[in-house]
Image (tube, rainbow, N blue to C red):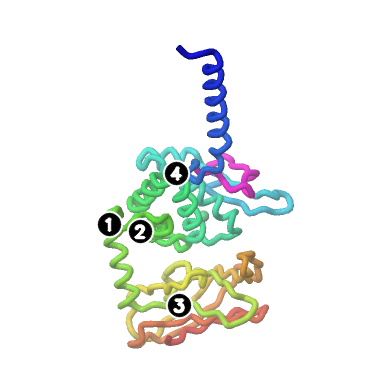
Amino acid sequence: MRTLARILHDGYRHAISAAMLISLFPLCASAQWAPPSSLRKVRVRDDCARTRHGIGLSVQPSPILPNGEIFFCQDRARAIDAVRPGASKFFLVHEYGHLALHTRDEAEADEWAARQLAAAAGGKQILEAVVLHFLDEATRFDPLYGSGLDRALRIARAGGIPETVWPPRLRGYEQTRAAAVAQGVTIRLRLAPGYTNRAEMIVSVDNQVIGFLTNRLDEPMVLPRFGAGLHRLNVSDVWLFHIEEDGKRFEIARRLYAETEFRLTAIRQLALDLGYDRENLTIAVKAL
Ligand SMILES: [Zn+2]
């Protein structure tokens, strides 16, 4: 039979354990995803009109809106979750990514969201669900995001989902892409040395939008099959930045446009050389 002292001791120990658990919980690496402390004041509003019935939209901080703002369409989130349960959370984290990185680069926001969720409790299931969501939309293309397949591949890689558990369609796409980079015509962005060290743009060839090109990643863009001969390449919605070593970015210019012509020959690896002299953006396609 336990003594009163013993009972009191046990009760005290349980109380301590509970208090410790509660205080340790927020420090635990596997806590459910929550925005980093610098983004806790960001207001999230359910407003499908503002997102134009897309799922989310973020507004960068400004003097009148010092924390920035996220608009999130709950109707759209419910529709996504009805097919791929849990997937909608990824899109919310993606919007926080734009604010955390002060970027409009959709791939960068995707990668940030994937890394954040990979480190959070339940995040792996969200990543797997959103990969399936993008495979459902495999061929849907937007120049700023790429295709559904591009987004699925990007999220699977950045989220550290082991290739052994990738859906077969995703593995097939990765192989097709690797072959296209190895055998197709590719173009790499090169910036003249100087203060401008980051450029982002939408590339079109012969008035066909190819995609979003940035020197953030050392990855070439694959051009679709074009015949030999003369082609017209243009870059639109070009944004230029100076990025400091700690990642801080300073905008230099936005919404620039330039065009050039190039001749496609047997050379498959091309460079897109970009120059900017404070007024004029110039581009030229060269063989690598
Ligand atoms: Zn985005």
Q: Which residues are magenta?
A: 33-50
Q: Residue at x 52, y 22 (%)?
A: 10
- Is the C-beta separation of discs 2 and 1 under 8 Å? yes
Q: Which residue is mark 1?
A: 169
Mark 4 and mark 2: Cα distance apart in space: 17 Å
Whether residue 54 is visible to the viewer of this picture, yes or no, is no
Type of amino acid under label 3: Arg
Mark 3 and mark 2: Cα distance apart in space: 21 Å
Q: Is residue 24 left or right of residue 64?
A: left
Could you say where residue 109 lies in the image, as x and y percent from the top left? Answer: 51, 57
- Is the C-beta separation of discs 4 and 1 under 8 Å? no
Disc 2 is placed on an element classified as helix
Mark 3 and mark 4: Cα distance apart in space: 33 Å
Question: Split into 4 quadrants, where in the image is the N terminus?
Answer: top left
In magenta stretch: residue 45: yes
Mark 2 vs ligand 1: CB under 8 Å?
no
Q: Which residue is mark 4?
A: 88
Q: Which one is nearer the viewer's eye here, 288 or 148?
A: 288
Q: Residues within 10 Å of mark 1 (few under 14, many from 20)?
A: few
Quadrant in which residue 223 is drawn = bottom left
In magenta stretch: residue 250: no
Q: Which residue is mark 2?
A: 149
Mark 4 and mark 1: Cα distance apart in space: 21 Å
- Most frequent secondary structure within the magenta stretch: loop
Task: First in sequence, mark 3 or 4: give its number.
Answer: 4
Mark 2 and mark 1: Cα distance apart in space: 9 Å
Q: Which residue is mark 3?
A: 188
Q: How many marks?
A: 4
Task: First in sequence, mark 1 or 3: give its number.
Answer: 1
Could you say where residue 214 lies in the image, as x and y percent from the top left? Answer: 51, 70
